[in-house]
Image (cartoon, grey):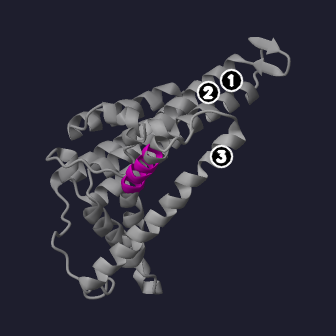
Amino acid sequence: MLKDITIGQFFPGNSVIHRMDSRFKIVLDILYVVILFVADNFISLALAGIFILMAYGVSEIKPIMMLKSLKPLLPIILFTAILNLFFVTGEGEPLVNWWIFTIYSEGITTAVFMIVRIMCLIIGMSLLTYTTSPIVLTDAIERLLSPLKKIKLPVHELAMMMTIALRFIPTLIEETDKIMSAQKARGADLDTGGLMKRAKALVPILIPLFVSAFKRANELAMAMECRCYRGGEGRTKLRQLKARPMDFMIALLMLTLLGFVIVDNMVF
């Protein structure tokens, strides 16, 4: 079950998206989030959804990866949909009025709209990590935050910590799966009982998971010290980030999409 979670994983490739300047990918990913929140009707949202589906097609990432990226956040998606379904009111007669539950057509529309928006948001953000290696992502974050060095902010260390945290997500998920399998082999019951019983059953999982996480962190720190890591001061880069004409074309396409969404909101 946990093996299907793909947050933080990188899938090597040679597609146009893989070869893009990672700085552009981060900025365009943020711009895509802006587009999703600016869109206030289904036409604009559909265009944003078609755009990200086309991006996945160009990146040659398997479509199943989109579903796997949604899996860990499915409870949040459903919770958001339920809140909008029951708490958004309308001007006309309710479609359902039973006990304390009242459902309007506006509530159904809003719930569907929010589900699609959150799904597009998740798969759009996942594409960044799917097509960008942790090392390149670190360099890109450091370059984008480099102006903050003027106020003595440790930009390199911040970028390194963010990337290591992201990179350790698949490792910790795999470790959790191994611990759960080991506990079940010893007779632990993790899937039945009430809420309190299940919460207590997580203790034998969380304790070894924390121990393993601290052990891995200590091993990583020792490995970095053995390689004479002393922070970002004076460090050189093996791969230099260079923008290509294709990067500017994709950026122009994204800006065009943003402009169309703004116009569509004003017209409709």
Q: Which residues are magenta?
A: 169-181
Relative to residue 58, is residue 44 drawn left or right?
A: right
Which one is in front, 84 or 183?
183
| Residue 86 visible in the displayed image | yes
- Per the image, the residue denoted by label 1 is 107
Q: Quadrant of the C terminus?
A: top right
- Per the image, the residue denoted by label 2 is 111
- Inspect the image, locate mark 2, and give the three-letter code of the amino acid beneath it: Ala
Judging from the image, what secondary structure is the residue with disc 1 in? helix
Residue 196, x across and y down, in percent? 71, 43
Please report contact status of discs 3 and 1: CB closer than 8 Å, yes or no.
Answer: no
Label 2 CA crowd tier, 10 Å (few <14, some 14–19, many 20+): many
Which one is in front, 7 or 210?
210
In the rendered image of this protein, does residue 166 appear above or below residue 125? below
Distance (Cα) linking label 1 and label 2: 6 Å
Relative to residue 233, is residue 178 drawn left or right?
A: right
Relative to residue 239, is residue 90 drawn left or right?
A: right
In the rendered image of this protein, does residue 153 appear above or below residue 57? below
Q: Is residue 172 magenta?
A: yes
**Magenta region's main secondary structure?**
helix
Tell me which numbered mark, 3 or 1, is placed earlier along the sequence: 1
| Residue 93 visible in the displayed image | no
Residue at x-position 22% and y-position 52%: 247
Front disc: 3 or 2: 3
Please report contact status of discs 1 and 2: CB closer than 8 Å, yes or no.
Answer: yes
Relative to residue 238, is residue 129 drawn left or right?
A: right
- Inspect the image, locate mark 3, and give the three-letter code of the amino acid beneath it: Ala
- Per the image, the residue denoted by label 3 is 199
